Image: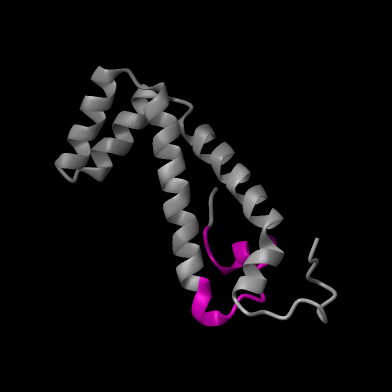
Amino acid sequence: MIKIDRSLLEELGLDALPPREQDPFLKHIFETLEMRVGMRLADLMSEEQLTEFESYFDAKDDAGAFMWLEATFPNYKEIVQATFEALKTEIAGSAAAILIASGVEIGDDPTISSE
């Protein structure tokens, strides 16, 4: 199960992120995941499937879109999970740079690696 909350920041080594930046960063993670999953699925779709899938979004029918995805791509949840794991690895690898960009002093905190 995917959880994009403050515990994720801790898992990624970003729990020292200033509180005012935590929710916007979590939102960024969610939007990035959504975009990457969408791109991955679009690559797997035929033109006809893509048109059908887009019709759900045009109608603002999220429930229908998810039902269609699950019927058309039974491995949809695995694609989402794999994409999420790759994104987490990417973010964790950049945690020190993210913290520095947010003004967090990492030199004195032994729990934060600048490598």
Q: Position of residue 47 (x, y in %)?
A: 27, 19
Whether residue 13 appears in this view of the structure is no
Label total for image: 0
Q: Nearer the viewer, residue 17 or 106?
A: 106
Q: From what the image shows, is residue 64 above or below residue 73?
A: below
Q: Residue furthest right?
A: 110
Residue at horizontal 56 percent and vertical 45 percent from the top: 84
Whether residue 75 appears in this view of the structure is yes
Q: From what the image shows, is residue 109 above or below residue 112?
A: below
Going by the image, does 26 lie left or right of 109?
left
Going by the image, does 61 lie left or right of 17?
left
Q: From what the image shows, is residue 15 above or below residue 39?
A: below
Residue at horizontal 32 percent and vertical 17 percent from the top: 46
Q: From what the image shows, is residue 68 above or below residue 14?
A: above
Magenta part of the protein: which range? 4-22
Residue at horizontal 58 percent and vertical 47 percent from the top: 87
Q: Position of residue 102 (x, y in %)?
A: 59, 75
Residue 24 lies in the magenta-colored region: no
Give the color scheme: rainbow, by chain, secondary structure or one colour.
Answer: one colour
Q: Quadrant of the C terminus?
A: bottom right
Q: Position of residue 6 (x, y in %)?
A: 57, 69
Residue at horizontal 41 percent and vertical 44 percent from the top: 35
Residue 21 lies in the magenta-colored region: yes
Quarter where residue 97 is shown:
bottom right
Going by the image, does 1 lie left or right of 32?
right
Q: Position of residue 63 (x, y in %)?
A: 26, 42
Q: Nearer the viewer, residue 63 or 36?
A: 36
